[in-house]
Amino acid sequence: MNQPSVAVVILNWNGCPLLEQFLPSVIQYSPEANIYVADNASTDDSIVWVQSNHPEVKIIQNTKNWGFAGGYNQALQHVNEPILALVNSDIEVTQHWLKPILEQFNTQPQTAIVQPKILDFKNKSKFEYAGAAGGYIDRFGFPFCRGRMFDTLEDDYGQYDQTTEIFWASGACLFIRKEVFEKLGGFDIDFFAHQEEIDLCWRAYNLGYKATYEPKSTVYHVGGATLQQGHPQKTFLNFRNSLYMLTKNLPTAQLFPVLFIRLSLDGIAGVQFIFKAQPKHCWAILRSHFWFYLMLIKNCRKRTGRYTHKYYLTTSIVYQYFVRQKKHFQDIF
């Protein structure tokens, strides 16, 4: 019997209820794969439950909670399959979800990263916040997706049912060639969580690899199961990591002009949080800027010298969304 070419790796931290709910669908609909649970030193019954109920699932036990980036970096050292599927523990997969993904890898050698269609588990007619139908960024590093612009989620009526090259794939469900993951050095652990997948895809893009959205594969994502949307720590991580990602990956000529404008836009966002009576979120932005200045020299040392000037799809998605009131991807592109 041939060894499966794909490893489905589910990162877990104290997520036993999620594994109980969603792991069975992954097992049922993934006959082409070996399935792993990579555990970030959980203190709940996650590992005992998997061992008792699904002994066919391979378990990788990390020594501590390394976060998303470090957790996968540690775990994937123990995985040998050529295609890696990094899947959140709150993902429900569907029948034949792997076949179109594997077809992409088999027929498109320059495609290094693939994302399926990601819909909302709680409302399966809508796209889900984390990834939707594939991601892009604007010139100033603000991420957006086909099917999701800021907090506006579109209904899925087949408008994004074409296989398309994208800029970044969601870490909620991301496929990547193992050789490319290793060539890139994996995720940057300094992100800890949030936007590390965009950084990974940007670094792959700078090396000439492609990321692809494959709509023939569909998964459903709960979202916010680890850190709730609207939490100040999430605000801190998103703003901090966005500045960090820009520092690492911007072309040299654009580095300081873009960062200056981005810092100014962050300041405007902080003022808006004050007017909305959300001072903790304003403080989170200030903390992200303090971190940026403190770590600037160190972070600049991570610049690789390999940059692509056309990394963005539009100059300012903030302007398109908030000023021009273009709420849907198709309204702009």
Image (cartoon, rainbow, N blue to C red):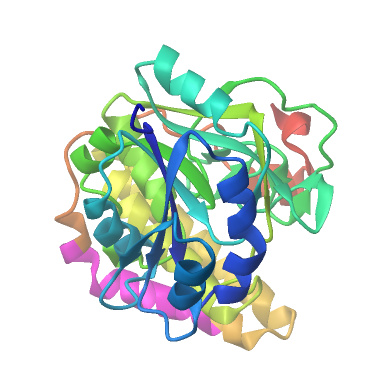
Q: How many marks?
A: 0
- Left-right relation of 45 to 128: left
- Left-right relation of 311 to 159: left
Q: Is residue 294 part of the magenta span, yes or no?
A: yes
Q: Is residue 89 part of the magenta span, yes or no?
A: no
Where does the image place residue 145, in percent across and percent down from the top left?
A: 63, 41
Q: Which residue is at 35% across, 29% downward?
A: 309
Where does the image place residue 299, in percent across and percent down from the top left?
A: 22, 60
- Which quadrant holds residue 276? bottom right
Where does the image place residue 7, in percent across and percent down from the top left?
A: 39, 43
Q: Is residue 250 above or below residue 2?
A: below
- Which quadrant holds residue 263? bottom left
- Left-right relation of 150 to 311: right
Which range of residues does the magenta coloring cover? 283-298
Q: Which residue is at 66% across, 77% downward?
A: 273
Q: Nearer the viewer, residue 306 or 104?
A: 104
Dominant secondary structure of the residues highlighted in magenta in the image:
helix
Q: Nearer the viewer, residue 298 or 66?
A: 66
